[in-house]
Amino acid sequence: MTISDPRAFLTGLFQAAVDAAQPSLCLPPHLPSPPKGRTIVVGAGKASAEMARVVERHWKGQLSGLVVTRYDHAVPCENIEIVEAAHPVPDAAGAAAARRVLETVQGLTPDDLVICLISGGGSALMTLPADGLTLDDKQAVNRALLRSGANITEMNCVRKHLSMIKGGRLAVAAAPAQVVTLSISDVPGDDPAVIASGPTVADATTFGDAREILERYGIQAPPSVRAHLRDAMDETPKPGDPRLDRCQTVLIATPQASLEAAAEIARQAGISPIILGDAIEGESRDVGFVHAAIARQVARHGQPAMAPAVLLSGGETTVTMRGKGRGGRNGEFALALAVALDGAPGIHAIACDTDGIDGSENNAGAVVTPDTLTRANAAGLKARDRLADNDAFGFFEPIGDLVISGPTMTNVNDFRAVLVLKF
Amino acid sequence: MTISDPRAFLTGLFQAAVDAAQPSLCLPPHLPSPPKGRTIVVGAGKASAEMARVVERHWKGQLSGLVVTRYDHAVPCENIEIVEAAHPVPDAAGAAAARRVLETVQGLTPDDLVICLISGGGSALMTLPADGLTLDDKQAVNRALLRSGANITEMNCVRKHLSMIKGGRLAVAAAPAQVVTLSISDVPGDDPAVIASGPTVADATTFGDAREILERYGIQAPPSVRAHLRDAMDETPKPGDPRLDRCQTVLIATPQASLEAAAEIARQAGISPIILGDAIEGESRDVGFVHAAIARQVARHGQPAMAPAVLLSGGETTVTMRGKGRGGRNGEFALALAVALDGAPGIHAIACDTDGIDGSENNAGAVVTPDTLTRANAAGLKARDRLADNDAFGFFEPIGDLVISGPTMTNVNDFRAVLVLKF
């Protein structure tokens, strides 16, 4: 098979990556058997309302419950209540919902089943400060953590020790019921204890670890937070805790599975897939430069594989704003890639956020072709200037190279594909 | 074969990469046959004195000549004069030497042979302003180009059109003699017309292109430069120019050949080499983050190859100074890699400049091991703080992880290897 339309081929790879993470496709095979007793559905995350809808559609028997999702991410459900709350900075709606989630799973019996639907963003959406702490306290610490340079594991350790629901505490509340957690991962390493701060997963970290992290990053926490981390007695459940014996977590979608789905499409088309990584981080433009250099290596030296080949990668890059333009991290990656490739023949690319929204505008990402710079020049657009102004949207929009999918109701982070054809 | 000492193995890969670019090893096989007439050796670059020494040692018969190298890069020669000059900003010594190089190749016959020894840095070292221009004029333009964001191809187009020697003009001067150019490449793509601005290679660019580049980057050139680019009549020789019919260029060392040499060592040890690129550019720390993510992909998913494997890459990264620390781009890459790997088991790495000097200190680069951060913590060194301060030297020096080779007398840019063992 030849690739007669590289743009359509790349869009197809992105679609395959999104499909692999669609609750409607990836969730049903992992639904547990109905229990003798009641079935309660809880959860939090950007994809959790859609996950709840899919559970409802496929569930044989009675169920009820409550899930929290981001504002504007609700979908209609019949028996599961959907509550919207703020992300990434928690609000009172999220706190009220979290308290109700905890109440919902209390008083269950060993015959009952809790299905917990977790996806990225759940940590902020299901916030419930520990006794003696206010939402303001937690928000202050959260903001300081986001600024501090602490990584996601460190941030979540602190969050778990200021929370009544995170770090396995939701599972403790649900005991002795059976708890099946269905997770969509958006974190490097796919550790269920990290995704949404693992409300149903044992936590190996301690109050002491949380204190050490605040100290390491010089975070000035409110006195109530410092007192709580020093004096609180109720540790999170540790690995091996018998209260979590009936808890089970299934990763129903991961960045890697989405990359593998795209790789399979490529393979069927006779294109060698080269999966570089499911958790690539770094400044978007520089990640773009590196992908361009690897694509040139394929074209010039047949390494790491001979053309035709497609580089695939996931993860979450970062844009350090230096200009005043519009666009997100995937657009910035694509623009930097176009600049670095400088019209190299036979190389096309796509970069999109799998949640369908790349930053502040309405596009999922953008496509790069060998004549991107030529077409842009003809339209009076200077690629380097647009890159310097962080204006990927302003660059790709006029030349018709935005990818617009609308919100996908799932999220396994970024998807990038760089296609190197024989030339 | 197992890798009992990963640090020694990685140091061995670096040594193999340097050896592959050593004039003493890679130059002799490419020496032409002695001519009927005279043999003249000329050239410029950081490695050119060493190249001249090797030519002398292996040459059967009489020769004489003159090569220009960087201050402190001279080596003793018997019949070829070695002149030192300034790099990267040209000085009067380089201009005087360039004039003498041109004189040296004048008045030759078809029976004579010119051996031209070219390596990185030659463009600045062999500077000879065109008639009507001063060295100050050229320096002003050169500084503005370095600041402008123009790429090396664009900078060289301008330089060639302000020069009496670049862009094939040296070859025109040497006609009708035979000219054999032996080049060590330090540029992406290894185009002989780009290396040291191709003094013996036809130039496809024009005075018009040079004017367009100054305009594109808004460079305020001195009036004499603008007048020269507008009025000069003597274009550089174009591809197909008969005066260059007897010119031949041999790439005796390239970044790719050095990576292949390291790959062969790895293969012999049962380690799969994954060559990512011979021309990777971008901010050093972000290039480090991407390499770390690819190494984790090898460890976790066996992609793009199963462990044991070694990622190999070359090119030239950049450090945007934000702090006040010491060290070069390879140390910064290594430190960022260590931070991103965060002690991942079984992953070791080396990053060095093949010229033996990584930035301002005396080290070629540094080594990363799984316990780098543990050992650094024990020594009171915080990796993230040192990275924020651009202080890779201050991080790796106290824990004994610098690589110190001394000047290697060659340069094929950066060498990086990330070894992922089974764990």
Image (cartoon, coloured by chain):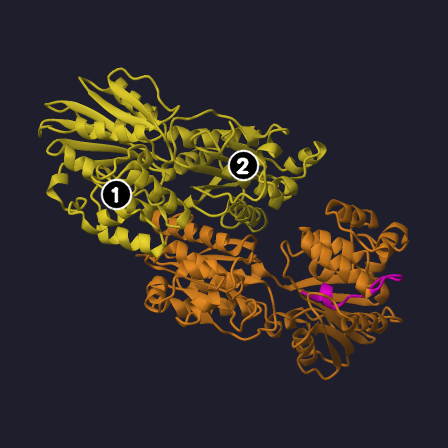
Chain colours: A orange, B yellow
Q: Are marks 1 and 2 on the same chain?
A: yes
Q: CA distance from mark 1 to mark 2?
A: 34 Å
Furthest residue to the front? B223
Q: Is residue B400 left or right of residue B258?
A: right
Say whether marks 1 and 2 touch (CB < 8 Å): no
Label for residue B276? none
Q: Give the magenta part as a residue range.
A: A121-134
Residue identified by numbered label 1:
B160
Residue type marked 1: Lys
Question: Disc 2 residue type?
Answer: Gly
| Chain of the residue under the numbered disc 2 shown in the image | B
Chain holding disc 1: B
Q: Quadrant of the N terminus of chain A?
A: bottom left
Q: Which mark is residue B331?
A: 2
* Numbered-mark total: 2
Q: Residue at x 81, y 50 (%)?
A: A206
Relative placement, left or right, of B122 versus A39 is left
The answer to if A123 sits in the magenta stretch is yes
